[in-house]
């Protein structure tokens, strides 16, 4: 059996307490690589041990065997368990045995009609929707399918307590997004990506891997089957063992490649669309991004694929497509909510992208709104149009320096709010500093911010 880590036990306790309060459909947030399946397996073990039935819904066939193996290892009564794909369950929902608890893996997908058909068919069952990102690109609200949200530990805490590996993030100094265009779904079109990621713009992925992560096992994310094969060929030509996989790769061949990778026989796997959610590949030490995305969920799955912990390990993330400019670092603190947000109005053909600026003085990374650095106050130089060549230099986004600057800012804010009353606080930064000083929970910050109009309803 798996021994739950402290934060996993804490999360499980929160779920039980939520149930005791009368909540029956609970969304559970926990960052990628934090063992959500193990938590679900323990809940399933306790449920089936009491003679109750469970239903486990996944959206990819590759994940089914992995879930079954985890459940068996946790001594779940498999005779009382149904584990399968949403596509199958939704077509035969009338034939499913009534469950007492329903688990939804990657629960941010559960707003889809296929999921909701299953969930609504069993109104008396507890629903537990696990996800790393309670977020939809269209801003849709989750309160249609969930009545409570449990927030897991933040990424920086998990790194500090050795539950995730620390990381170094490298990205091009400048990225031209003018060639990227969006589809109706809000994602970048494949055709526009093909034009935007020419080597003369982003640099050579093989050379940068050799420079920054040579010898480490890596996963590379590309935007289609052809680009996956081209990248694999480039690595193999450089003497680095690499295999390309995609949805078109036969299952037996794909399973063999994954097993060879796990055994260290393959250095790098390039893929399109496969290793985004759920599949466990614990020995990934480096991630290479050659696919730009508008999805925060995808970005965090990409970036954090390499952050499984190991003593002495530092994960390397190489971002050739400027995803960090759209979302910030994967370690950034994010506020999750069931309420969703209004969909941003964007031009139907052109992506709206904010560039990240790196201050030359303190190395802080931020979205530029003026001519001075908001962290250290240094004058920012004018952005220059420069020619980017194949050997474009990648710049490390230094999290240690950024954290030092952030701590300095927080210290100044804390001094400013020390003698104030809650009614005198006027910004999120002040509320967070005040809560930290008085050891208040995060919910206090959210409640105060909402009452003050700092958070949109």
Image: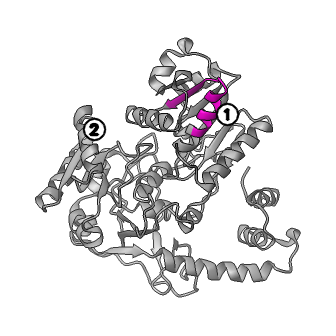
Q: Position of residue 251 (x, y in %)?
A: 27, 32
* Observer able to see residue 138: no
- Of tags 2 and 1, the one toward the viewer is 2
Q: Are marks 2 and 1 in contact (CB under 8 Å)?
A: no
**Looking at the rendered structure, which numbered label has been put on residue 255?**
2
Q: Which mark is residue 134?
A: none
Colouring chosen for the image of the structure: one colour
Magenta residues, start to end:
42-57
Check if residue 210 falls in the magenta segment: no
Under circle 2, the secondary element is helix
Tell which circle, 2 or 1, labels the residue nearer the N-terminal end. Answer: 1
Mark 1, secondary structure of its residue: loop
The x, y position of residue 260, in whole percent, is 24, 47
Circle 2 crowding by C-alpha within 10 Å: few under 14, some 14–19, many from 20: some
Say left or right for 340 vs 290.
Answer: right
- Quick one: 260 or 335, which is closer to the camera? 260
Which of the 4 image quadrants contains residue 259? top left
Point 52% across, 77% down: residue: 402
C-alpha separation, residue under disc 2 versus residue under disc 1: 37 Å
Camera-nearest residue between 157 and 425: 157
Residue shown at 55%/27% (left/top)? 77
Q: Residue at x 59, y 39 (%)?
A: 42
Q: Is residue 16 above or below residue 393?
A: above
Relative to 37, is 301 above or below? below
Residue 126, percent across and down? 68, 30
Question: How many C-alpha atoms fall within 10 Å of the one at disc 1: few (<14), some, or many (≥20)?
Answer: few
Q: Would residue 277 be found to the left or right of residue 426 on screen? A: left
- Residue, disc 1: 144
Closer to the camera in the image, 249 or 386: 249
Look at the picture and state if 361 lies above or below 71. Answer: below
Any part of residue 134 in sight: yes
Q: Position of residue 324 (x, y in %)?
A: 44, 63
């Amino acid at each position: 059996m798996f021994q739950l880590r402290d934060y996993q036990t804490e999360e499980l306790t929160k779920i039980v307490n939520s149930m005791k309060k009368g909540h029956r459909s609970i969304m559970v947030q926990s960052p990628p690589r934090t063992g959500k399946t193990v938590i679900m397996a323990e809940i399933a073990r306790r449920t089936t041990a009491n003679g109750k039935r469970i239903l486990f819904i996944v959206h990819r066939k590759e994940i089914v065997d992995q879930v079954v193996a985890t459940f068996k290892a946790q001594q779940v009564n498999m005779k009382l368990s149904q584990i399968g794909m949403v596509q199958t369950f939704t077509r035969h929902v009338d034939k499913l045995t009534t469950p007492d608890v329903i688990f939804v893996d990657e629960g941010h997908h559960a707003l889809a009609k296929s999921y909701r058909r299953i969930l609504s068919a069993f109104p008396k069952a507890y629903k537990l929707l696990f996800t790393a990102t309670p977020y939809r690109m269209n801003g849709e609200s989750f309160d249609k399918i969930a009545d409570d949200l449990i927030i897991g530990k933040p990424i920086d805490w998990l790194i500090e307590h050795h539950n995730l590996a620390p990381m170094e993030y490298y990205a091009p100094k400048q990225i031209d997004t003018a060639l990227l265009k969006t589809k109706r779904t809000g994602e970048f079109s494949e055709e526009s990506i093909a034009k935007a990621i020419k080597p003369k713009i982003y640099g050579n992925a093989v050379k940068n891997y050799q420079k920054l992560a040579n010898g480490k096992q890596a996963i590379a994310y590309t935007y289609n089957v052809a680009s996956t094969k081209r990248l694999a060929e480039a690595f193999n030509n450089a003497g680095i063992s690499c295999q390309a996989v995609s949805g078109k790769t036969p299952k037996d061949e794909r399973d063999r490649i994954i097993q060879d990778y796990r055994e260290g026989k393959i250095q790098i796997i390039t893929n399109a669309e496969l290793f985004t959610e759920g599949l466990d590949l614990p020995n990934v030490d480096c991630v290479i991004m050659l696919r730009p995305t508008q999805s925060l969920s995808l970005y965090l799955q990409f970036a954090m694929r390499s952050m499984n912990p190991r003593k002495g390990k530092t994960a390397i993330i190489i971002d050739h497509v400027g995803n960090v400019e759209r979302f910030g670092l994967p370690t950034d603190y994010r506020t999750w909510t069931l309420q969703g947000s209004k969909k941003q109005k964007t031009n139907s053909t052109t992506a709206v992208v904010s560039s990240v600026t790196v201050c030359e003085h303190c190395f802080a990374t931020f979205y530029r709104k003026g001519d001075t650095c908001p962290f250290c106050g240094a004058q920012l130089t004018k952005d220059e149009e420069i020619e980017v060549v194949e050997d474009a230099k990648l710049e490390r986004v230094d999290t240690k320096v950024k954290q030092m600057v952030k701590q300095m800012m927080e210290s100044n804010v804390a001094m400013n709010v020390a003698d104030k009353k809650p009614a005198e606080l006027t910004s999120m930064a002040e509320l967070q500093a005040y809560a930290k000083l008085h050891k208040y929970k995060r919910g206090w910050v959210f409640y105060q911010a909402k009452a003050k109009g700092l958070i949109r309803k």
